[in-house]
Structures are given as structure tokens and as C-alpha cells.
Image: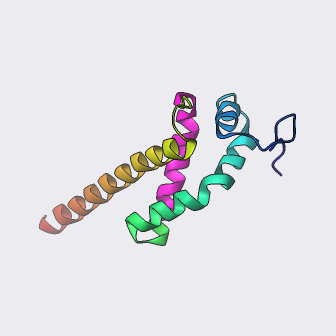
Amino acid sequence: MVTNTTDVSGKPLSDAEIATRIAAGDQNAFVLLMRRFNRPLYRTARSILKDDTEAEDVLQEAYLLIFRGIKSYRGDARLLTWLTRSFDGARCDRIVTHVLERLEKVKDKDV
């Protein structure tokens, strides 16, 4: 169960506070981030990839990139914008992987 979803005054945690807590190792804050942003990130992935399974896979890869790179979030852009950029990186990696897999299959057929 996610705890500490509000600050001391009872207000929901800001995006910057969530990012700060994740950078400090707060796993509950990461769960909160995923719950807060999963829908818009998934919709973005699905609209680009046109495939539910691929969108889910890319989103998982993006969450790994986000978790590893959250310390670089400076707060000068909305967190969703920063997350989307991380998603774009994961999507690009996924496309490269698919291209390489296809090339390998073509190569295997030619041999």
C-alpha cells in the first residue's frame, strides 16, 4: 500500500516532491508516480506504437529509465514532460531492437 501521498499540511505531494523522494530511494513515491502518470504515458505509447503489448513493454522499459534517471529531474519542466522524454528514449531503444531483430531474421534466411 502506498503511504505518504500527502505533505505535512495534507496537500497531495507535488511532482517535484515525488521526484525528490524517488531520488532519495523512496519506493512508495515511485509507486505513486506510476499511479499518477501511467494513463497518460500509456496513451502516448499506444498512440505511437498502435499495439497494446508493445506499448506495455515500452512503458515498462521507460519506468526503468525513469527510476535510474530521476536524479536528473531539475524541476524546470513539468514532471510529465520529463517522463515523456524518458518514454521517448525507451521507445527509440525498442524500435532499434526490432529493426536489429528483423535484420537478423533476414540474414538467417539468406544463409
Front residue of 15 and 66: 15
Q: Residue 101 sits in which quadrant?
A: bottom left
Residue plotted at (57% across, 34% down): 70
Q: Is residue 74 above or below residue 12?
A: above
Residue plotted at (67% across, 30% down): 20
Residue farthest to the right? 9
User: Which part of the image, by quadrant, shows the C terminus?
Assistant: bottom left
x and y percentages locating residue 61 in the rendered image: 50, 50
Residue plotted at (49% across, 45% down): 81
Left or right: residue 58 versus residue 1 is left
The colour scheme used to paint the residues is rainbow
x and y percentages locating residue 27 in the rendered image: 72, 40
Give the main secondary structure of the magenta stretch.
helix
Residue plotted at (51% across, 56% down): 59
Left or right: residue 52 versus residue 31 is left
Residue 81 lies in the magenta stretch? no
Residue 63 lies in the magenta stretch? yes
Residue farthest to the left? 110
Q: Residue 9 sits in which quadrant?
A: top right
Looking at the rendering, the stretch of residues picked out in magenta corresponds to 55-72
x and y percentages locating residue 52 in the rendered image: 49, 71
Total labels drawn: 0
Q: Residue 49 sits in which quadrant?
A: bottom left
x and y percentages locating residue 31 in the rendered image: 71, 48
Left or right: residue 49 versus residue 9 is left
